[in-house]
Each structure stands twice: as C-alpha cells, then as structure tokens.
Image: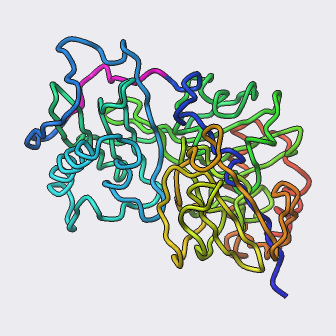
Amino acid sequence: MLPLVLFGLVTAAVYLYFAPGQARELPLSCNVPSQPFVKSADSPSETLDTQPISGGTDPCSEGSVEITDVTGQGDTLYSLLSSNLVRRSSVTRVAASLVSQIKQHLDEPFDKNTPLKAGTRFNITLDRNGNLLKATVELDAAHVFHAVCEDGKVRAWQEDVVLDFKPETICFTVDNNLIESVLKTGEGMELALKLTNVFRWDIDFQSESVKGDVCKILFERRYADDRPSGYGRILCAVYEGKKTAKKTAVLFNDTYYDDTGKELKKNFLRSGAPTGTSVYSVAGGTVTFSGWKGGYGRYVCIRHETGYESRYGHLRRIFVRKGQHVTQRQRIGLVGQTGLATGPHLDFQLLVKGHHVDPLRVKMVKVIRRIPTPLKGRFVSVARQRLSRLGSLVLTQRMENFSLSSVR
C-alpha cells in the first residue's frame, strides 16, 4: 500500500509583502551600498523608457519597493523580469543588458530564455511608480550581476568578489510573525526566507507561529571583499513553538535532518516560503487545468499521487500549462485578484479523491529516510557540535539513544 502523504500548504495566502493594493505592508526602503561595487567593463547602455533619475537625488528618499526572491524550476531571466516589471519594453532592455554581461563570464551559452538554477537569488528595486531603479541576479556566490537605471538608460556589470563565509548565531523571540521577527534582529529578508525554506515540510509559519515562540539559528554569513554580503547555508536551526513543539534541523551532506537523524524532506510541503507574490506547487504532480475558471479567475489544478489534488485560484499570472509535470516547490504563478476576488489573495484548496479536506488537519504517514548507517557517527558529532553552539547544552534523550545505537 502506498504510504499516506501529508499535505503541505503554500501559505494560506502567500505572504503579501509586495502584493498590489497592500501599500501599508510594503517596505518603502532599499539598500544602497556605501561603497561602489568593484566591476568589470560596462556593457553598452540600453535606453529605458522610464522617468530618468535626476542627478544627485537618492531614489530611496522618494520611497521604493524592494523585491527579494529566489527562482523556481524553469524560471528564466526574462520570466523573472516579466513577473516584476510593468513595461514590456523595460523587460526586454534590462534582460538584454544583463545577458550581454553574463555571456562574457560564463563558459556555456546563455540568453534571456536560458533556465536559471532553482534557488537563484535576485533582487529588484522599483520606484513608487513601478519603474526600475536597480536589479541584481546572483547566479551563484561568485557570479553576481547588477543592472542600474541611470538617466533613463540601463547599465549592467558583474560584481567581482573575493568570498568568505563565517559561522554566526542568532536567537530571537517571535513577536508579530516570523519574517518581521528576523528583520527586527537586524538580519535580512534572505535569512528569513532560508529559515522558512528549511522547515517548510514541518511548520506553516503563517498559522502555527505564535508570539513568544523561540528560534535559534547557526548560519554562514557571506563576506565579499571583507564586506557583509548576504548569507550562505543555515547549518543548524531550532524552533520551539507553542503549536509546533520543538523542531530541529541539522545540515549534513547537503540534506537537513532532525536531531535523531530523520530526514526533514517529505512528500508534501507543510508551508511554502513566503516569497512575495510567488505561488509554489505543494508537491510534484501533473497540471490538469491551467487557465480561466469563472469566479476563480486564473486557476491551476495539479494532480498528485494517491488521489490528492491541489488547486490555486485568483492568480495574476500562470507559469504552467495543462499536461505539464511540475516538481515540489516549482513556481506555478503569482498571487492576484482575478475572477470574483475582492482583494489580492490566494484561494488554495486540497482534495483527496474528489473531496475537500482541511490542509492543516491532514496527517502524514510516510517512508522515513534516515542517515545511512556508515555515516551515523559523523552525523552525531556534527549535530552535537552545532546544537551546543546554539546553547542546547542538554541533549534530548532521543539524541542520546541515537548516539548509543550509532556506535554499536
């Protein structure tokens, strides 16, 4: 018998930090580096049909919107720009300018429609009228490309960096929500997104995060030319919640495990990372409907294994087609207000064999994947070291039992 699978939920209404019509929630700031980036020869400037920025004026003083996200499966440079820039002509010119730089620094062919690696970080800053101020695409830690609008033209370059990673820890108490709580520590949105990504199979931070919950993170801070420049991996994290109980994640061999050596990854997402207006598939499956569906507006339906089906309504844009196979956490659309929606939100439904179920009440039984026996001893050593650094001086009885069994 196939194992039952737990549903995971792309947040009940995917985090609407940047959804239109929610201006009170938009962060009206942008991070302008105090030092200019070290860059290679500029690519030819591309004229952009937008309001020129007057010389000597700080665009942040007028208010701006900063969009930070990571790519999903199948995203391209052109698709991610199209998702966030209003003017099609602007998309074309910004893409062309970035492509001209990227091609000079990669060994393989690259154009605006070349699929980017899933998880590629990008940042787009717009003025309050939706015009481009700047964009950054980080193909990997050593290949960071920038585009800036200056006097109505787009200039692009590669940031040349010497990278270094140093482990650091933070501990915080959840106040309003997880994202805001991370930001209050002085850390960036990228770390908050990485944290939700680590626990996405076990915690729905939109419905299960409670004021007073405690979180500890051991992470890598990335330095570029001795300047803080984002984040590397989350090495270990512990979340102690009133609803979630204690959840632990330890990175080992590029996979996250709990403190007993059980792999965190499951068949369905418990929660999708709250990355702006992006909507992700909660599990792998086949798209059975993609298009307009009456009051639901733009609508996507995905069939999963063992009779499960997920549905996503009121989307502003759709990135998948009927018959297409999608993977877990593949970006399938953007939150919108189509159909009979009275405001920007995601209408998410889960069905089992044709019957609607409450996603948060679905229980999971799955094949549990564990640390391979030859690696148990090494895992225990790594987990002990990292948990101790987080202040977990008294290990759980489960951890002690696992440690004993690993040496037999």
Dominant secondary structure, magenta: loop
Residue 260: quarter of image? bottom right
Q: Position of residue 323 (x, y in %)?
A: 53, 79
Magenta includes 242?
no
Q: Quadrant of the N terminus?
A: bottom right
Q: Residue at x 82, y 39 (%)?
A: 240
Up-down: is 47 above or below 34? below
| Percent position of residue 10, x then y | 67, 53
> Relative to residue 180, is residue 33 drawn left or right?
left
Image check: 372 left or right of 186?
Answer: right
Q: Does 2 appear above or below 121?
A: below
Q: Is 210 on the left-hand or right-hand side of 13?
A: right
Q: Is residue 364 visible?
A: yes
Residue drawn at x 68%, y 63% is 311
Q: Quadrant of residue 15?
A: top right
Is residue 120 or residue 260 the one in the foreground?
120
Residue 408 picture location, percent across and down: 83, 74
Q: Position of residue 75 (x, y in %)?
A: 41, 59
* Magenta-colored span: 28-38
Q: Residue furthest bottom?
A: 1
Residue 30 in magenta stretch: yes
379 or 96, which is in the foreground?
96
Q: Nearer the viewer, residue 235 or 278?
A: 278
Q: Nearer the viewer, residue 64 or 34?
A: 64
The reply, left or right, for residue 15 in relation to residue 160 is right
Number of marks present in the image shown: 0
Applied colour scheme: rainbow
User: Looking at the image, can residue 407 be seen?
Assistant: no
Q: Residue at x 36, y 17 (%)?
A: 60
